[in-house]
Image: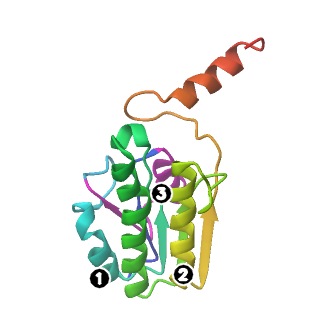
Amino acid sequence: MSDALIVGATGLVGRAVVANVGASGLTILARREVAGHSALVAPPERWGDMIAAERPAVLISCLGTTIRQAGSQAAFRAVDHDLIMAVARGARAGGASRMIVVSSVGASAKSSNFYLRTKGETEEGLRALGFERLDILRPGLLTGDREGPARLGRGLQWSRRRSPTF
C-alpha cells in the first residue's frame, strides 16, 4: 500500500506536485518514464487495475489535455472524463478514501461549453463514487513551462503582461 498515487505527473501541474511533494510516499503511474523519478509505466487502459492493486490511501489526478492536443472532442473526453473516472474507480476498488483532482474554473455539467460540461460531468461522477474526501481543484488559466506547442491562452496572457495597452 502506498500513501498516495499520482496520475498525470508528466504535465504542468503534475510535475509541480511531484517536485513539491517529492518521491517519498508518492507512487507515480505514467504511460512513459518520468525523468529523475521511479515510476510504474503502463498504457492508460491498465491504470484502473494497477491502482486497485497498489491500494493507495490517496489518488491524485492531474490528468488533463486540451481539445486541440487530443485532436477531437471525443478524444478529449476519453482523457478528461473516461480515464479520470477509470482511475478513480480503481482507487475506490483498492480502498482509497481520498482523491484530489484538478478540474477547471467554471466546470458545470449544465454548461453549454463542451470543455466545461465535460469537466462538470467528471466532477459529478467522482462525487458519486463516495470518497470520504474529494478535493476538486478548479484553477483558471494555467501558466508555466510546458512540453509541446504553446497554447493560445498562454500567449494572450503573456501579451497582456508585456503590453499594458493590449
Q: Which residue is mark 1?
A: 53
Residue 142 part of the magenta segment: no
Q: Nearer the viewer, residue 85 or 27?
A: 85
Of the image marks 3 and 2, the number of the one nearer the N terminus: 3
Residue 128: give its label.
2
Please report contact status of discs 3 and 2: CB closer than 8 Å, yes or no: no
Q: Quadrant of residue 7?
A: bottom left
User: What amino acid is at disc 2?
Assistant: Ala
User: What amino acid is at disc 1?
Assistant: Ala
Q: Which residues fall within the magenta stretch?
A: 12-31
Q: Nearer the viewer, residue 85 or 19?
A: 85
Label 3: element kind: loop
Q: Residues within 10 Å of mark 2 (few under 14, many from 20)?
A: few
Residue 62: give its label.
3
Residue positioned 62% across, 40% down in the render: 141
Residue positioned 38% across, 86% down in the render: 93
Label 2 vs label 1, nearer the camera: 2
